[in-house]
Each structure stands twice: as C-alpha cells, then as structure tokens.
Image (cartoon, rainbow, N blue to C red):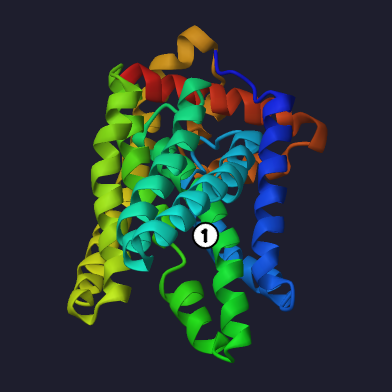
Amino acid sequence: MPEAPKPRIRRLLVLGFVVALLSVGAYAAETPSAFLIALIPLAYTIPAFVWLDRLEPEPRAMRWNAFLWGGGISILVGGFANELTDATFGTTAALVVSAPVAEEIMKALGILGAAKRRQLDTPLDGAVYAGYVGLGFAMVENVIYFSQAITDDDLGLVFVMRGLFSPFAHPFFTLWVGLAIGAAVRKGRSRRFAALRGLVPAMALHAAWNASGVNVVFAFLLLGHIALFFVVVRRLRRMRRDEIALVRRRVPQLAFVHNLSPVELEVYGDLRATRRLRRELPRKQRPAFDERRLMITKLALQEES
C-alpha cells in the first residue's frame, strides 16, 4: 500500500522552503514585488500538470511535498554548490557544470522520495512529480532574476524570457528523471539506477541551456531545446491517451471481482463522464466516489504492467 506523507517530513519541507525564500530575500529585500511576480507563471504552468494528472491524480499532499522539495531543499543545496563553484572556478563553471549537476541531482531525490513511498506507479506519474519539483525550484529561483531585473529596469524582457518563453525549463530538464523512474517502477527494476540513467539527459539539457546564455556560439542549442520540448509534449499527450484507453479496456475485466455497477462501467475511463457523474452526486458522497474510482483506475493500470 502507498505510504502517506509523514507530518515531520512535511514540516522539514516547509522549513526548507521558508529558509530558501529568506535566503533569496537577501537579493530581493529592496524589490519585494519580485516575490509576487514569481508566482505569476504558476498560474499557467501548474494547470498543465493538473491536466496531465487527471486520470489518476496523485495525492495533494505528495504534490505539495514535491513542490516544496524543489523550492526548498533542492534550491538551498544547489545554490550552495553554485556559490562555492563560482567562488572557486568562476561563473561559467557554476552555470555549465555545477548548476546542471547539483540542481538535477537534488530534484531527482524529490522524485525518488515519491517512488519510495509507493506513490509513483507509471512514467506519467514520474513526469507529474518532476513537474512539481521543477516548478517549485523555478519559482524561488525566479525571485532572484526578477529582483535583479527590477533593479536594472529590465523586468519586461526578463519576464518574457523566463515567465513566458521558458517557464517549463526546470520541469523539462527533470522530466527525464521522472520518466525513467516511472518506467523502472512499472517494470519492477531499480529506481536508483533509473534515476542515474535519467540524470544523463537532464544534466546535458540543463548544461546546454545554460551554455546558450554564456556564449552566443551555443545559442543555436535553444532551437534544439524548443523542438525537443514540443516532441516531448506530444509524447506526454499520447501517454495520457494510452492510459485512458487502457483503463477503458481493463475496467470490464475488473467488474465481477470488484462488483462494479453498470454506471461505473460506463463512466470509468471517460474523464468527462466521470466529472458529470461526480457533479450530480451529493457533496458527502463525492469523497467515496473519488476513492473508488481511483482504486479501480490504479488496478487497471497495474494489471497491465
């Protein structure tokens, strides 16, 4: 059975997130609006992962854990490694070597935490957790960039570049780790080895992205990132459709064992029908309906793996 998030773990994650915000507050002490502006991209990035996760929604507490890990522990450790590398080897080394290595390793640990608690069952689940970890990291990091942009009177350009052009950058890098871990869990293979395998493209893409900002010679790499991003988005949509189709095929086979009613047979695997039925139920019956639907969906996906 999946393990519920422990309160002490949540308290640690919240503490890490608060410490991270206080740390970046040193950069944004004179530009407090940077904190509010950093929240804006979340309004159109989080819904994308909510949509991706709609068939078998991950527990809200686990999604918050992933977000807080990315915006707390990950950014604190990654930031320390980057500062140390910058002071020792220079800014370029920090951007192209330290940031991709330290930041992606820390974000990967957040996904492994979800897998350890048996909340991650499929590659799509891995993509969802990678998304929340990456968005948490990006939000706190954006405070620094937006604060500097306000000081330099260059907020418009920086917001377009980070808030509109590349709001999914950190989730995109970490996505490869999430997909690898999800595939390993489904096949019963080593999660840690899968994480190492996923870290290779994650670090490479992160390093190439940062290098494009250091030297114009590498700017052409951005075109490759954009093309690959759209390929990945298309693949994720296909994975979502495949999971929905799988549940539709498997539900009738589970009907006898789990005593499914004709109404349940009709709506499970059809997200629109499920939402309509849920809205028609009395509010008190909705939690039980959600729990049963989620159980059947998980069984349908697990039976195939």
Is residue 41 shown above or below 180? below
| Image point (51%, 73%), residue name | 163
Q: Residues within 10 Å of mark 1 (few under 14, many from 20)?
A: many
Viewer-closest of 3 and 276: 3
Q: Is residue 22 left or right of residue 222?
A: right
Any part of residue 132 in sight: no
Residue 47: x and y in percent read 55, 57
Please state the horizontal and vertical placement of residue 17, each as a whole percent of the image. 67, 47
- Horizontal placement of 283 versus 92: left or right? right
Amino acid type at image mark 1: Ala
Residue at position x 20%, y 74% in the image:
218
- Residue 173 shows in this picture: yes
Residue furthest out toward the front: 88
Image quadrant of residue 232? bottom left
Instruction: Provide residue 135's location: percent of width, then percent of height.
Output: 52, 55
Which residue corresponds to mark 1? Answer: 138
Say above or below: 97 vs 290. Answer: below
Q: From what the image shows, is residue 111 above or below residue 241?
A: above
